[in-house]
Image: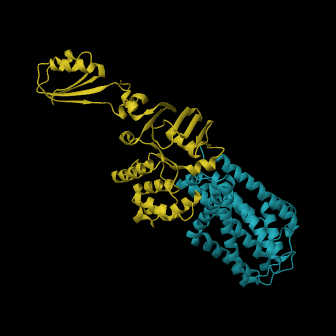
Chain colours: A yellow, B cyan
């Protein structure tokens, strides 16, 4: 395993606000890493420090073994960062912007790569358009294209699909998955947890300036010992509350359904209790926790449930 | 790596030159028209008059001053507007994320400003040929002096662009600092002819040295030694280049 990014004791504060509090994190080469957290958790600040947009107070970050302060020119060459905020150079059209951007990263005559990216992101027919002629979604695509023109080893996508249509999401993820398979390291921050759940190998969860958990997606999901048992019956009776008094129960009389939250070792007992009811079971569904549940638990956004 | 770094540097310069070329009506032709109007007005109003203390036609005296004034204003405007627009639009992040060294950022922006200043200055010189004949006593010196002066004001434009948080702030810098210092620098008159203490006060105006040394290169005469002016102006240039590079290094008003 080779380390792509090593974040070592990073601290950053804005006045009284401790935006990043002793962040330690390793991202492996070639992995698809998700960085999740609620608004204000410090994700963008951390990415800003990585890319040189934000000055850190203390700590260090290395990118492919190079220090982001001492060897910042080398580390920036390895990084392709898509910032969260849409920004564009008003003087140049899409193709000119990408040519200039290529030059900024030391590449001349980059037309082949530019055409590939324009095609992958559905921007080919907008290549000669000025940024003011582009819709919000198209501007977002241009932002992503700019980060990819120099074929960086590590691609950082900070909320790349915020406010964009499904079509872009699909074409973007298709292209990013292809890049990841080619060996590129991908770091993704997103509010769409289902995206992270589908795409990421490992996930780091941040809250209030701290990394509260880093693990593989599967381990994170399995860390919640909870199943949701949904049972549809021919009739609901008043004694349900009594039978399942020691469980979290939610009865829907109208639809003749009830839900019980159980841990794995309670499953057998609960199934026996359901069998003992004076009712006919019409349907039953057992669902495992999702990444969203883990996220809510770790960031306590779920109102302290679980 | 050297090749990559030179492409990176060249790209910034190219971007800066392309930027003002895209809006040439505003960045090149507008100053050309306004300065040409100055030339017409002064050539008509002061025909057959000599500049005080110089024994040359007034139009010969004023041409180097007008060229330098345009050079100063356009060099300053180029870098300051490039940066404030980049900050306003948010595309300043492109520069921060790219692998520029701090001195490359200083020099890249500065060369963009110099290119516009020199282009406008040269075109105004071509127009001025119709008014005074176009003779230049020391052409090589004129070019060197013009390069240094436009470099200084390009660097000042960078400082203004970094400092400014909105477009108004740049105009404060321009209207309350650059324009008064330029108009009171001896563009339109010789400071030798100023009454009483005003002649000495003018020596505290850094733009005076710039105008005076360029006038020397054009007409072979100046209010003070052109070499003293060159030392003062050259030292100012180096100090500003150091300051601007430092500002890029600390990310003054562009990094949080």
> Residue B146 placed where, x, y %?
75, 69
- The residue under the point 80% across, 71% down is B214
- The residue under the point 48% across, 64% down is A112
Q: Is residue A251 above or below residue B106?
A: above
Total marks in image: 0
**Nearer to us in this view, A27 or B184:** A27
Task: Left or right? Give the position of B95 relative to B148.
Answer: left
Quadrant occupied by the C terminus of chain A: top left
- The residue under the point 66% across, 53% down is B101
> Residue A149 placed where, x, y %?
51, 57
> Residue A108 placed where, x, y %?
57, 63
- The residue under the point 59% across, 56% down is B84
In the rendered image, the residue lying farthest to the front is A1
Task: Left or right? Give the position of A280 relative to B68.
Answer: left
> Residue A247 placed where, x, y %?
27, 19
Q: Is residue B22 above or below residue B40?
A: above
Q: Is residue B170 visible?
A: yes
Residue B54 occupies quadrant: bottom right
Q: Is residue B198 visible?
A: no
**Nearer to us in this view, A124 or B3:** B3
Q: Is residue B195 above or below residue A149?
A: below
Residue A248 occupies quadrant: top left
Task: Left or right? Give the position of B90 relative to A59.
Answer: left
Residue A102 occupies quadrant: bottom right
């Amino acid at each position: 395993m080779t380390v792509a990014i090593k974040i070592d004791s990073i601290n950053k504060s804005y006045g009284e606000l401790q935006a990043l509090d002793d962040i330690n994190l390793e991202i492996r080469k070639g992995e698809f890493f998700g960085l999740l957290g609620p608004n204000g958790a410090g994700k963008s600040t951390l990415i800003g420090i990585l890319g040189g947009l934000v000055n850190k107070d203390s700590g260090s970050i290395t990118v492919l073994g190079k220090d982001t302060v001492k060897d910042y020119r080398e580390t920036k060459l390895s990084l392709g960062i898509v910032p969260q905020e849409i920004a564009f150079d008003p003087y140049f059209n899409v193709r000119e912007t990408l040519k200039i951007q290529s030059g900024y990263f030391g590449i001349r005559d980059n037309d082949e790569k530019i055409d590939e990216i324009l095609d992958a992101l559905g921007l080919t027919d907008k290549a000669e358009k000025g940024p003011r002629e582009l819709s919000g979604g198209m501007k977002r695509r241009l932002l992503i294209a700019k980060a990819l023109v120099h074929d960086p080893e590590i691609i950082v996508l900070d909320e790349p699909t915020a406010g964009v249509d499904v079509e872009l999401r699909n074409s973007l993820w298709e292209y990013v998955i292809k890049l990841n398979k080619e060996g590129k390291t991908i770091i993704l921050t997103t509010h769409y947890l289902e995206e992270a759940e589908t795409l990421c190998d490992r996930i780091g969860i941040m809250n209030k300036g701290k990394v509260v958990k880093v693990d593989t997606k599967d381990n994170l999901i399995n860390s919640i010992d909870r199943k949701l048992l949904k049972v549809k019956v021919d009739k609901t009776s008043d004694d349900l509350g009594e039978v399942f008094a020691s469980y979290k129960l939610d009865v829907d009389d109208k639809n003749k359904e009830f839900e019980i939250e159980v841990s794995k070792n309670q499953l057998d007992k609960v199934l026996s209790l359901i069998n003992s009811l004076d009712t006919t079971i019409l349907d039953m569904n057992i669902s495992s926790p999702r990444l969203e549940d883990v996220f809510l638990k770790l960031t306590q956004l779920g109102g302290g449930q679980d | 790596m050297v090749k990559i770094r030179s492409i990176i540097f060249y790209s910034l310069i190219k971007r800066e030159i392309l930027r003002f070329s895209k809006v040439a009506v505003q960045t090149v032709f507008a100053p050309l028209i306004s300065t040409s109007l100055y030339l017409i007005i002064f050539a008509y109003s002061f025909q057959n008059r000599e500049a005080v203390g110089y024994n040359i036609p007034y139009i010969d005296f004023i041409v180097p001053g007008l060229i330098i004034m345009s050079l100063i204003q356009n060099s300053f405007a180029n870098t300051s507007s490039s940066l404030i627009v980049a900050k306003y639009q948010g595309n300043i992040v492109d520069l921060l994320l790219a692998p520029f060294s701090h001195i490359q950022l200083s020099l890249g922006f500065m060369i963009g400003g110099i290119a516009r200043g020199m282009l406008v200055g040269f075109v105004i010189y071509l127009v001025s040929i119709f008014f005074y004949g176009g003779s230049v006593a020391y052409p090589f010196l004129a070019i060197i002096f013009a390069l240094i002066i436009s470099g200084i004001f390009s660097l000042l434009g960078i400082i203004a662009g970094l400092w400014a948080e909105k477009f108004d702030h740049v105009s404060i810098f321009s209207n309350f600092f650059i324009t008064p210092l330029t108009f009171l620098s001896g563009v339109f008159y010789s400071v030798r002819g100023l009454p009483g203490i005003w002649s000495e006060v003018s020596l505290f105006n850094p733009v005076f040295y710039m105008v005076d040394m360029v006038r020397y290169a054009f007409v072979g005469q100046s209010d003070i030694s052109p070499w003293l002016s060159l030392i003062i102006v050259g030292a100012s240039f180096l100090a500003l280049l150091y300051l601007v590079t430092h500002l890029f290094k600390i990310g003054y008003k562009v990094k949080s």
